[in-house]
Amino acid sequence: MTLPALIADADIPQVLGLSHLAQQVFDEVDLTPVFNSMTARVNADSNDAAAWYDIALMLTLTGQIDRGLEIQALAMQASRLYRRVHGDGSDLRILAFVTPGDLMANTPLDFLLEGSNIRLDLLYVEPGVALPAELPDHDLAFLAIGESKSNAVVLAALEPVLAAWPRPVVNGRPLQIAGLTRDGVAAQFADSGRIVAPTTRRLTRADLYPLAVGETAVSDLLPGASFPIIIRPIDSHAGLALEKCDAPDDLAGYLAQHPGPEFFVTDYVDYASPDGKFRKQRVAIIGGVPFISHLAVSDHWMVHYLSAGMAEKAERRAEEAAFMEAFDNDFAVRHAQALAEMTEGFGLDYYAIDCGETADGQLLLFEADVAMIVHAMDSETLFPYKKPAMKKLFAAFQQMLQATADHQALGIRAA
């Protein structure tokens, strides 16, 4: 396969991008002047794709997700290709295959490229929409589309395209990414002696009704499991509509409140530490090597960093700092075989996991995906230990990209 015709740089809309705007929002900077400027631009020119794009990002980042997606659709009508330049853009040229959606639809490349001089071109693809006739030249491509029910079709369509792509493709295994479903990951490691992946099944409301009224047992639906169970709608993230049901009545109440047709149901594993608190780690795996993104310590079994009290509790930040400092020689060593098993099983150059540890020290795998948010936006005053750890992670990611491009260049010269 040869590349399509090359597009002129001047014809690619250049955007402020996710990492720039997200940091502004995170720092509580007033974006009204920027928003008004972008709005004036689209009022003057309805085909100003870059302005539409950044407006959509600002809306999404400030919690106006539905409106943000509406504006994103207008941006897609104007252009399917956008450029985000890091530094002076003099190093690698990356073409990323992405898809429309919220902040969790794609690998957060804009964060991962922080501190680099990489030129990132974002090509938005959707089912049934042909690739543009012209594309920018690039050193390597990156498949950045995350696993979700809505993304499964586009991932399947990209399999033959990327298999024949004339440049190296990082994470270029669409069907492997599509397989990172909650139930798929649980089934993949069900027999592992190193990884605890709680039994998970995708069940319909009709499947769950007999359990909710006491006519069947949990083990009839989840072999070997019993109450409590965890339930969430398909494609939900960040704890949205996620609940623990301790008995049939709890499940009946949940189904009454959530009208969706299909749910993921998971066997609950009590992973409380001896002090009664729950700890969850986010780990990025880059070329098979683990890097810590964060540790959250919470009083609640459903752990999310922003609601775990990390900013309010100095002792939790101190624990996270110590954990991150010791990560390479402690957690990464203790779970080296488990992490290697995962990397071999997934077959991906880059992915991230949310995990914990069981009472007997095994790795407890909650979720794996290529689109988990990994960032360095936290306050350096409150979290002085974060920037060095994230710079190390970002540097490793960028080095992996460079090594992939260099390997291809050597192959071309050898030929």
Image (spheres, helix red, strand yellow):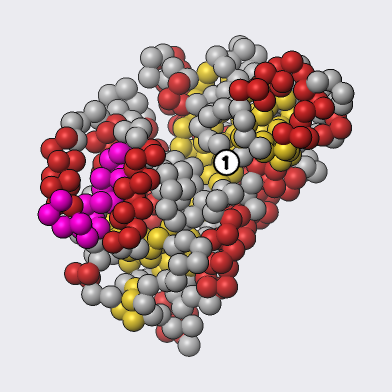
- Towards the viewer: 340 or 198: 198
Above or below residue 147? Residue 3 is below
Dominant SS in magenta? helix
Q: State the residue in front, 91 or 413.
A: 91
Magenta span contains residue 175: no
- Which quadrant of the structure image shows residue 254? top right
- Where residue 317 appears, as percent x and y from the top left, is 42, 21
Between 334 and 238, the residue placed more toward the observer is 238
Asked if residue 59 is among those painted magenta in the image, a careful observer would answer: yes
Left or right: 66 in relation to 301:
left
Residue 38 in view, yes or no: yes
The residue wearing badge 1 is 235
Estimate the x, y position of residue 144 in percent, counting from the top left. 46, 56
- Residue, far top: 275
Where in the figure is residue 380, as x and y percent of width and height? 29, 29
Magenta range: 43-61
- Kind of residue at disc 1: Asp
Query: Is the residue marked by circle 1 packed among few (<14), some (14-19), or many (20+) residues within 10 Å?
Result: some
Residue closer to the observer: 305 or 203? 203
Q: Quadrant of residue 46?
A: bottom left
